[in-house]
Image (tube, rainbow, N blue to C red):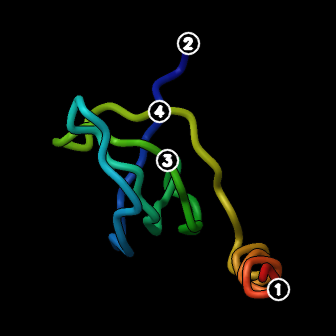
């Protein structure tokens, strides 16, 4: 399996932390030297290991914000 290269360009916020110290974070991440995208996933303390996550373009993130803002 090919190694996935990533670089966290900007840490935007932590949503939660579990009992093992992993944090669910929103970051701007460049995957395999591509244009950075908004990324929501669990990370260990050193950001060397990660869980499954969701990667969004800026347009998708803005649309998600609209949807969340509509929730009452």
Do residues under tags 2 and 4 come within 8 Å of each other at their CB atoms? no
Q: Which residue does the numbered mark 3 point to in the structure image?
A: 41
Inter-mark Cα distance, 3 to 4? 6 Å
- Residue 60 - label: none
User: Residue 70 shows which numbered tag?
Assistant: 1
Point 64% across, 50% down: residue = 54
Instruction: Say if mark 3 contacts mark 4, CB within 8 Å.
Output: yes
Quarter of the figure that contains the C terminus: bottom right
N-terminal of the two: label 3 or label 1? 3
In-front residue for pair 8/22: 22
Marks 2 and 3, the one that precedes in the sequence:
2
What is the secondary structure assignment of the residue under circle 1? loop
Q: Nearer the viewer, mark 2 or mark 1?
A: 1
- Residue 67: where, in percent of width, then height? 82, 78
Residue 16 in picture, x, y percent from top left = 36, 54
Label 1 crowding class (10 Å Cα cut-off): few <14, some 14-19, many 20+?
A: few
| C-alpha span from label 2 to label 3 | 21 Å
Does residue 26 appear to the left or right of 43 in the view shown? right
């Amino acid at each position: 399996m090919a190694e996935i290269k990533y670089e966290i360009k900007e840490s935007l916020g932590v949503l939660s932390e579990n009992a093992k110290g992993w944090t669910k974070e929103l970051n701007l991440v460049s995957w395999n030297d591509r244009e950075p995208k908004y990324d929501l996933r669990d990370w260990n303390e050193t950001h060397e290991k990660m869980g499954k996550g969701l990667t969004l373009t800026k347009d998708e993130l803005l649309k998600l914000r609209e949807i969340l803002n509509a929730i009452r």
